[in-house]
Image (cartoon, rainbow, N blue to C red):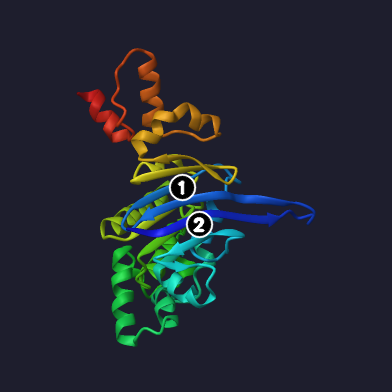
Amino acid sequence: MAIIKIESLVFEYRKEDGAETVKAINNVSLDIEEGSFTAIIGRNGSGKSTLAKNINALLLPGSGAVYVDGFRTSDDSAVWEIRQRAGMVFQNPDNQLVSAIVEDDVAFGPENLGVAPVKIRERVEEALHSVDMYELRKKSPHMLSGGQKQRVAIAGVVAMRPKCIVFDEPTAMLDPRGREEVMGIMTRLHEEGITVILITHFMEETVRADRIIIMDAGQIVLDGPPAEIFRHSDQIRRLDLDVPLAVELADRLRKRGRAIPWDIIEDKEMVAYLCR
């Protein structure tokens, strides 16, 4: 069943000079199944982050419609229902941290939803454990590393118990270790049944998803499972995007006559295959 349904979505913004409008999203339709892990990638200006904000009702369609668990985002009376079902984690965790103590920050969302205090405590503890931040619950967020701050931001969304979490380039400001920590959390949340939508510009992060959507100029140009998407590596490069190292190596080996299976798209899979 689709938890996110997008029908002929168009979203325009006006340029700084005010004289011209640009279609950031141009007639996009797609369904995202509940419990799935979808990665959306594209170069700067492709429309991927604008699409994410439409899913969370931070932006509203110029035309067309977006539905979250059956609620239409343009319906003002449904905003709270939508935000409870589709949480959002942003690129800069400092933009989401509002309290001086980690556990208070995680409690902020449930408090605003009117959750009972006893239940809030349970949710905060569960959320902090889920991101491995329970031991730092009494710390001040400004004392944490970038990766730890992002984990606290994720915990704050998890504590609201959404069915879906939209991650809008959550690793863009992190070092490799922090990126791996956040990707690991996303994988665990997906395994627990939460629908994950990852907006990213790191192609190697997309291999963990069930489905990859590539956007360009406000439209979807490729959509499918990772192994199928990376069969179009030449087209991906023409879109000014990289492919994962394993895919790049496989392409080069095929040109030299090696019959590398198309489903090998991760480094560890490639290493295992070559070692055999």
User: Relative to residue 239, is residue 87 depicted above or below?
Assistant: below
Left or right: 8 with respect to 166? right
Q: Amino acid at mark 1?
A: Ile
Picture quadrant where residue 137 is located: bottom left
User: Residue 82 falls in which quadrant of the image?
Assistant: bottom left
Task: Assign a secondary structure to mark 1.
Answer: strand
Quadrant of image for the N terminus: bottom left
Asked if the residue at tag 1 contacts the one at tag 2, i.e. Cβ–Cβ closer than 8 Å, the answer is yes
Q: Earlier in the sequence, mark 2 or mark 1?
A: 1
| 259 lies above or below 104 | above
Q: Is residue 224 left or right of residue 79?
A: left
* Residue shown at 30% from the left, 82% from the top: 119
For label 1, count other residues whose C-alpha is less than 10 Å away and answer few (under 14), some (14-19) or many (20+). Answer: many
Direction bottom: furthest residue: 117
Q: Residues within 10 Å of mark 2 (few under 14, many from 20)?
A: many
* Kind of residue at badge 2: Ala
Q: In this rendered view, identify the residue nearer to me: 236 or 144.
A: 236
Seen in the picture, residue 169 relative to 118 is either above or below; the reply is above
Residue at 49 percent across and 70 percent down: it is 97
Q: Residue furthest left?
A: 276
Coordinates of residue 140 in the picture (x, y in percent): 45, 72
Q: Depth check: 275 or 67 in front? A: 67
Q: Which mark is residue 52?
A: 2
Residue where numbered disc 1 is placed: 40
Residue drawn at (51%, 30%) of the image: 237
Residue 227 lies in quadrant: top left
- The x, y position of residue 276, in whole percent, is 19, 23
- Which residue appears at 38% of the width and 73% of the height? 160
Q: Position of residue 222 (x, y in %)?
A: 46, 38
